[in-house]
Amino acid sequence: MSLGLVVAAAAFLYLFYELYRRTFLDRWDDDVPISLNIPFINSPRIDKIRVQHQVVLEKSREVGAHISRGILPWKPWRSTVVVGHPTILREIFVGKDWEAFDRPIWSQEPSQTYHAGGLILIPNGKEWREARELLGKTFTTTTVRSYMPILTEELKTFVDLAEKENALHPDGFDIQEFYNRYTFDTITRLTFGSDLGVQHDKETQYLKAWDSLLAVSSLWNLIVSVSGEWAVPKSITNEFFKNYNVIKDLITSNLERVRSGKTVDAKVSILDDMMRGQLPEFMQTNEEALVKQLMTLLFAGHDTTSALLSFLTHHISNNLEWQNLVRQEVTKAFPGNEPLALEKLESLPHLTAVVKETLRMYPSAPFGAGRQMNRDLRLSYADKDGKQKFVQFRKGDVVMSAMFVSQMTPEFWNKPVDDWDPSRWLDDPNGGASSPYAYAPFGNGARRCLGERLALGEARITLAELVRRFEVVPAKDPEGKFKFAHYFTGTIKAANGVGVRLLPLSKA
């Protein structure tokens, strides 16, 4: 028998043993249901890829299990555990063993280590702590409020352009497209201090490169999850890096500007603030690490905020009662077109309620940022009948924090979860949830999203300006062009855009 056959036989036996161990023997280790996941067949079906967040939720509701384990037949040694139970989410976020849920997942998300390889995917440890301390200074309440001049200026541009588009298309237009450009201009200007003018030119190379980068990244990671890195065609990696390098060149040119002492248009810039401070040693000696941090800022501050604004606008346009409540609140707080101020906006209960409710139904990252176990860990939780259950995490397991499940499971809330009902937040900071960890659209604990204050601030100021100037109503859409649906490509987005009409209040 040749050596090759021996090796092949040994590999087959190992694969068979691991498959048997993880699907049969391990069933007795805990109470988590196990399934064999075959992409495009059942995990999810090929026609359900773009709605896999809804598939996971439906399955969770159907079987009554809010934690599940999936195993690829050809990779049985590493399971994917999807966690949607608040008790275990608490352990992931703030439990005494939270550092066992590590990052990044190098073998699972190769392309994401480029555009999200900063704080999102950097592993627990010294470099992560140093990076978080450095970037944390740029997202304090005081610092975010200092960004108000830039937010106000970009918002004015957005409203002016949306108003012109509304005049051109009186039956309605897709406001999501405008949010996409608006949030990109805002985060790049805050990061680098200069205006790229994306709002005025949707064909700009930067936005096109960014959108292409994310689309190709999703395809790359899908192929890796199914077959492995070896199966990714060269054409895909070439396309990814072509677009990645456009954004990287933008970052490196601004790094050169700061190092040369040149000033920018804006009075504030995250990059300038970072470079004025003491960079961690790993960023000083490795520019690629610094580029990844800045790339991650763009990722976290653009797509997620655009999605939030899109879903928020959809619901307030279809719920005029709540739109009027927010409008009354805003006009009372800012009479006579008084300039908006974040500190006042943060205190408005109805405005806060509509934002929180939208995030409950559409968390931008429905499965959070994946984690990978760096050791074995056994945890317990109680089911809806109070019976104790166990979940056994094994070293190497991929763990997904399924906020879409916990935030949309009736068992964890005291009001219907499929209804957009901001009233749940008016008298209860937890929205009637059975646990504060049932709601965590920005995560929680030490790895909570640093950009939360900026995202919420941008959402509040944008909605406040819209409703005090316009009545926002759905587009006239007899063909169903803007039929509401949402899909998943790493973040949740409105699949067909968000069609609206903006009626000036003097004519509403």
Image (cartoon, helix red, strand yellow):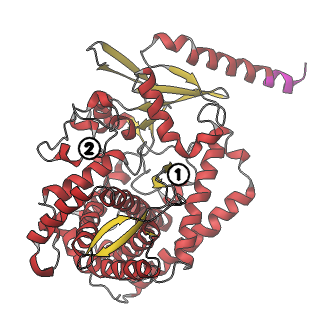
Query: What type of secondary structure mainly makes up the magenta span?
Result: helix
Which residues make up the magenta segment? 1-8
Circle nearer the viewer, 1 or 2: 1
Q: Secondary structure at mark 2?
A: helix
User: In which quadrant is the C terminus drawn?
Assistant: bottom left
Mark 1 sits on what residue?
A: 489
Q: Is residue 229 above or below residue 76?
A: below
Query: Which numbered disc covers residue 445?
Result: 2
**In terms of image quadrants, where is residue 240?**
bottom right
The local crowd at label 2, few if under 14, some if 14 to 19, many if 20 or more residues have their Cα within 10 Å, is: some
Res 186 → quadrant: bottom left
Which residue is painted at 67% across and 29% down in the image?
A: 74
User: Gap between marks 1 and 2, in whole Å?
Assistant: 25 Å
Amino acid type at circle 2 is: Gly
In this picture, residue 41 sits left or right of residue 443 = right
Where, quadrant-wise, is the N terminus in this rendering? top right
Is residue 140 visible to us here?
A: yes
